């Protein structure tokens, strides 16, 4: 019943709201384009700009102008970008459109999109720009046909990805909050629908704790989402191996600079180091871990535990074996830790040194995978490794470029739900139940659009299963 | 005297749907034949003798704004009326009234009889006559044939109805009435698919045997009230309702007879309403509750019969008697009429257009329980829409489609034709997305223009409504011109020099306070109008927000989908979406988007192809 979920992802937007999205594919192009469309696009973009006071805003239509983009909340500089303004109706969508050409890459485009959303734009739905263009009669038929093919293909990937993502804990957390709100709403509604049986309003003291709880749950969720934003969209790589297997060296080599302090002393890496790089059109989050060894040291063993758990959560595992050392029980532990995963690339390091390791111990374990032999000194094996990483990324990538927006959309909807709940709290005690219910219902609607559920029927089901009502 | 056997429209069934349908057709100046199995049961209330409540009351009011009869009829015949939900906010307030059951019927019958365009006829329709998917007429049980341009079928619970009382079951349309046999089969032959539903009612008892001292009295409103915009409320004789409760003994009796309940034994196959469970259902589903509230409602001034809301049951008659007698106040009552369950045929409503015409057979309209609904108001709302549309079709006028943001009638019909129903469908205010904008008080601004357009509301009455709406609007502007003066009572000191409109927005301010805030302000002296002014001002922010949502919604409602749209030509939509769209054939993109299984991606593709098709 996947398609039932699809139907609730729909949000065509109002004619007078303004949408924004990253228009260029995810990855590391030189330039990223963010498109904003709707009646408020100029005023929303203006919030983010520091301009030469002599130049007018919006700039003359269809002319590129230079602007400095800042975070309006703290004045921090984000990027220098080119801005192009397309005045309604002479634009792609037929509405006022602004395109921001910024420096490419995941971090900057994403940051700018977030700022646009804080300034009042809404993350666009897949195909929404084109949809608006259709509705405003802007679409040339030949053009539309080709755009449609793309959208159509992307939508599927997008929604599949959305569902995949939702099958996890995000979904269950949101469902949990939504169900609590639905129960609250059903208490309010049953009193409204069956006034003969229960004549009193629901006391504010019954409503407040539920809303408080929901707001705090949602804000926790947002915090967590914020801190794991990049990893949600970048392909995660984790390096694992016994101490001194060359994990930090390999990471530095891949990143192209000395990110991690490399030492011959095993166990140097205790706090995990994470960084990002782009390769083959993908963004990667790469993480170095503590060396796996049998240790009495409490700090070290904590680090090792973390190493194991990061293996579980990553998209690609690089299992490193020191080619210059004899096989030992730590290597067995590494093998055990990764044996159940498919997305492992075994790497024998230090090819430049004398080979002491028994390769067959590794090939036994990874019979259908080629082992990469590398040397960070000579750079040998590195291209092969990056190629293999890109292959795995392709198969494990959550989806197309839209996944970025998807997450922002979730965030957008969660923020909407929180806003509604806050409004409800402001009004608690001063407005009647049917007004209160509007904001609670808006919150349930917003969360339902993430999880793909219909408020009206869920609400009635909750009422009938929780309350004994009716003649 | 009718000189031919041809009528512009034939209405089958004279319940709440049939009556409104026939009146709408007649008020649009067409001849209508109203056929019913029993002329003595026109407009009968076989269950609660009551109209209104949240959602249902809104519909009664909407029918009034459209020029229908229900509101005026209950105004003329009620014996108890009061406001409900007054403390719960403007969107959900509604009137509820107890009818004098017999007078409610006889007034309706008289309205029908007095109309020159309406011909009443007792008879059972056994067959529909069609030609190339157009309705042509009916055959009734006497063998007579009547011919027509359109048929509206409002068959209630009569189609192959079977009543269950304990182990006993027998064919009936309602208790004491013949079922309608032949019509379902006639519909099926035309390719229309039908299902089976169940509903039920409670036993009636004699008030002279009730010990009211053991019950709690519920008095009607002391202020005269009215459902209709066109009724001037006047004092009238009213009766109280009474409240009592089931006891643990009641529940024990019911529980120990579960094995004799047709609901649990498999004897009843039709699906009953969850919102209107029988008492055995409640005891079964909520075993922890040791008491349920029971309302005792008088059925009229001229009868002792009492309706006991909350005790609907199809248990054997001896069990019904035993559990009723275990309830405080009812220890000594005898049963006058038994409670019963009834199963009946209905038509899957996804086979209908928004006009309530069947997609298979042109000019065949269905309204009321035949479409899977329950309730007098729900039936009447469909009745008036089907009547207007049948007449409009014959007169070549545009069809009447009430949208989800315009009224509960619109929500009801859209839900039915888009999602279908698995249980008898009842309206709830929670079914509406735009509840605050669809209030009891503003049905006139939402729908009266349609009533006027089709001639159901006269110019004179339409002017009367518009004058009042204009007063509301101009008075809201006027409140901006007056300011709170220095000598205002101290609790309003925060508003000094602000406009009266601003002051009225505060939760604690009422319209009645305004004269104290500025003594030169001339207040409007009409409670109905001032309460509407107050709602519009106080909830302006919420109303504006809802207006934005409605604008968004309308955009997609306005893109219509031709019924012969070839969904097979649309590449890129899912198999499931394609089959749902082909089956339901939505009238608009908005409706298509509400079909479960149709995704936003499908909708995007659909809009694109539609544009393409229309530009060729």
Image (spheres, rainbow, N blue to C red):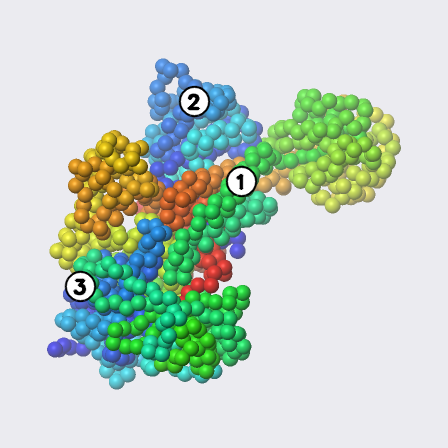
User: CB of mark 3 within 8 Å of CB of mark 2?
Assistant: no
Measuring from the top left, give residue B84's x and y in whole percent. Answer: 33, 58
Name the foreground residue: A429 vs A259: A429
Name the foreground residue: B507 vs A137: B507
Measuring from the top left, give residue B1's x and y in whole percent. Answer: 12, 78
User: CB of mark 1 within 8 Å of CB of mark 2?
Assistant: no
Name the residue: 79% across, 40% down.
Answer: A335
Measuring from the top left, give residue B421's x and y in whole percent. Answer: 42, 63
**Disc 3 and disc 1 on one polypeptide chain:** no
Q: Chain of mark 2?
A: A
Farthest bottom residue?
Answer: B142
Left or right relative to B451: residue A124: right
Q: Quadrant of residue A227?
A: top right
Name the residue: 34% across, 74% down.
Answer: B306
Name the residue: 30% across, 67% down.
Answer: B240
In the picture of the structure, the residue carrying the numbered disc 2 is A49
Q: Nearer the viewer, mark 1 or mark 2?
A: 1
Name the residue: 29% across, 41% down.
Answer: B509
**Disc 1 and disc 2 on one polypeptide chain:** yes
Mark 1–mark 2 distance (CA, rounded to whole Å): 33 Å
Left or right relative to B177: residue A36: right
Judge the density around disc 2: few (<14), some (14-19), many (≥20) Cα neighbours within 10 Å.
Answer: many
Image quadrant occupied by the C terminus of chain A: bottom left
In the picture of the structure, the residue carrying the numbered disc 3 is B28
- Compared to residue B33, the image places residue A277 above or below, namely above
Measuring from the top left, give residue B144's x and y in whole percent. Answer: 23, 82
Q: Residue B600, can we see it?
A: no
In the picture of the structure, the residue carrying the numbered disc 1 is A216
């Amino acid at each position: 019943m996947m398609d039932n979920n699809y139907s609730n992802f729909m949000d065509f937007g109002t004619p007078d709201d303004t949408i924004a999205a990253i228009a260029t594919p995810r990855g590391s192009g030189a330039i990223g384009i963010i498109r904003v469309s709707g009646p408020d696009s100029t005023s929303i973009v203006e919030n983010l700009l520091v301009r030469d006071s002599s130049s007018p805003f919006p700039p003359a239509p269809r002319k590129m102008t230079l602007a400095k983009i800042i975070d309006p909340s703290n004045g921090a500089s984000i990027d220098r970008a080119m801005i192009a303004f397309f005045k309604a109706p002479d634009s792609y969508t037929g509405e006022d459109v602004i395109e921001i050409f910024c420096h490419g890459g995941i971090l900057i485009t994403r940051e700018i999109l977030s700022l646009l959303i804080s300034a009042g734009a809404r993350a666009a739905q897949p195909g929404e720009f084109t949809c608006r263009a259709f509705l405003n009669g802007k679409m040339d038929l030949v053009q539309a046909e080709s755009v449609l093919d793309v959208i159509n293909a992307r939508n599927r990937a997008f929604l599949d990805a959305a569902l995949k993502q939702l099958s996890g804990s995000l979904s269950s957390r949101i469902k949990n909050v939504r169900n609590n709100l639905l129960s609250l709403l059903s208490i309010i509604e049953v009193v409204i629908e069956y006034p003969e049986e229960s004549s009193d309003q629901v006391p504010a003291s019954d409503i407040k704790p539920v809303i408080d709880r929901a707001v705090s749950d949602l804000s926790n969720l947002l915090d967590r989402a914020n801190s794991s934003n990049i990893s949600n969209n970048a392909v995660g790589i984790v390096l694992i191996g016994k101490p001194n297997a060359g994990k930090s060296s390999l990471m530095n080599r891949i990143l192209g600079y000395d990110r991690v302090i490399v030492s011959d002393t095993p166990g140097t890496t205790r706090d995990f180091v994470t960084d990002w790089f782009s390769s083959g059109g993908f963004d990667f989050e790469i993480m170095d871990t503590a060396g796996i060894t049998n240790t009495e040291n409490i700090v070290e063993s904590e680090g090792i535990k973390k190493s194991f758990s990061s293996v579980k959560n990553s998209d690609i595992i690089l299992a490193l074996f020191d080619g210059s050392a004899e096989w030992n029980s730590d290597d067995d532990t590494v093998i055990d830790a990764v044996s159940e995963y498919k997305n492992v690339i075994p790497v024998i390091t230090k090819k430049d040194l004398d080979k002491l390791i028994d390769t067959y111990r590794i090939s036994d374990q990874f019979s259908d995978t080629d082992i990469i032999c590398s040397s960070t000194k000579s750079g040998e094996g590195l291209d092969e490794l990056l190629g293999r990483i890109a292959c795995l990324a392709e198969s494990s990538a959550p989806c197309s470029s839209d996944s970025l927006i998807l997450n922002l959309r979730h965030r957008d909807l969660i923020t909407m739900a929180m806003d509604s709940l806050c409004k409800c709290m402001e009004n608690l005690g001063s407005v009647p139940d049917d007004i209160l219910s509007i904001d609670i219902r808006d919150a349930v609607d917003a969360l339902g659009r993430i999880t793909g559920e219909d408020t009206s029927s869920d609400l009635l089901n909750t009422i009938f299963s929780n309350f004994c009502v009716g003649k | 005297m009718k000189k031919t056997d041809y009528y512009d429209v034939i209405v089958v069934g004279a319940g709440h749907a049939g009556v409104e349908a026939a009146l709408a057709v007649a008020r649009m100046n067409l001849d209508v034949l109203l056929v019913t199995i029993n002329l003595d049961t026109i407009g009968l209330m076989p269950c609660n003798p009551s109209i209104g409540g949240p959602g249902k009351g809104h519909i009664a009011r909407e029918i009034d704004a459209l020029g229908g009869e229900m509101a005026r009829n209950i105004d003329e015949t009620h014996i108890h009326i009061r406001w409900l939900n007054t403390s719960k906010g403007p969107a959900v307030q509604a009137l509820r009234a107890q009818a004098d059951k017999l007078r409610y019927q006889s007034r309706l019958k008289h309205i029908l009889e007095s109309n020159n365009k309406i011909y009443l006829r007792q008879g059972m329709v056994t067959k529909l006559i069609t030609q190339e998917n157009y309705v042509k007429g009916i055959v009734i049980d006497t063998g007579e044939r009547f011919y027509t341009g359109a048929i509206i079928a409002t068959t209630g619970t009569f189609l192959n109805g079977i009543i269950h009382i304990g182990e006993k079951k027998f064919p009936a349309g309602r208790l004491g009435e013949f079922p309608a046999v032949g019509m379902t089969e006639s519909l099926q032959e035309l390719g229309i698919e039908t299902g089976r539903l169940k509903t039920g009612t409670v036993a009636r008892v004699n008030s002279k045997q009730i010990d009211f001292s053991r019950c709690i009295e519920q008095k009607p409103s002391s202020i005269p009230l009215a459902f209709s915009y066109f009724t001037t409320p006047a004092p009238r004789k009213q009766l109280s309702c009474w409240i009592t409760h089931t006891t643990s003994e009641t529940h024990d009796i019911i529980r120990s007879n579960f094995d004799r309940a047709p609901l649990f034994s498999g004897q009843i196959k039709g699906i009953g309403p969850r919102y209107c469970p029988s008492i055995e259902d409640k005891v079964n589903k909520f075993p922890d509750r040791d008491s349920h509230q029971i309302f005792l409602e008088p059925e009229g001034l001229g009868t002792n019969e009492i309706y006991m809301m909350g005790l609907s049951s199809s248990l054997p008659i001896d069990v019904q008697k035993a559990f009723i007698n275990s309830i405080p106040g009812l220890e000594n009552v005898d049963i006058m009429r038994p409670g019963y369950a009834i199963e009946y045929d209905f038509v899957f409503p996804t086979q209908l257009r928004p006009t309530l015409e069947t997609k298979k057979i042109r000019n065949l309209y269905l309204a009321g329980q035949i479409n899977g609904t329950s309730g007098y108001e729900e039936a009447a709302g469909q009745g008036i829409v089907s009547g207007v549309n049948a007449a409009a079709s014959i007169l070549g006028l545009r069809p009447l489609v009430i949208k989800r943001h315009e009224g509960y009638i619109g929500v009801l019909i859209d839900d039915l034709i888009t999602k279908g129903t698995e249980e008898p469908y009842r309206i709830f205010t929670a079914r509406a997305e735009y509840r605050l904008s669809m209030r009891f008080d503003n049905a006139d601004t939402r729908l009266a223009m349609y009533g006027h357009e089709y001639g159901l509301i006269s110019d004179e009455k339409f002017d009367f409504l518009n004058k009042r709406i204009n007063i509301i609007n101009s008075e809201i502007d006027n409140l901006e011109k007056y300011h709170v003066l220095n000598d205002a009572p101290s609790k309003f000191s925060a508003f000094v020099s602000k406009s009266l409109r601003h002051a009225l927005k505060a939760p604690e301010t009422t319209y009645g306070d305004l004269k104290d805030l500025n003594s030169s302000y001339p207040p409007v002296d009409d409670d109905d109008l001032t309460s509407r002014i107050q709602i519009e001002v106080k909830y302006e922010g919420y109303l504006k927000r809802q207006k934005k949502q409605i604008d968004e919604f309308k955009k997609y409602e306005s893109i219509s989908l031709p019924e012969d749209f070839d969904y097979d030509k649309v590449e890129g939509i899912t198999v499931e979406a394609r089959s749902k769209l082909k089956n339901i054939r939505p009238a608009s993109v908005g409706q298509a988007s509400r079909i479960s299984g149709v995704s936003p991606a499908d909708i995007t593709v659909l809009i694109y192809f539609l544009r393409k098709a229309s530009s060729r």
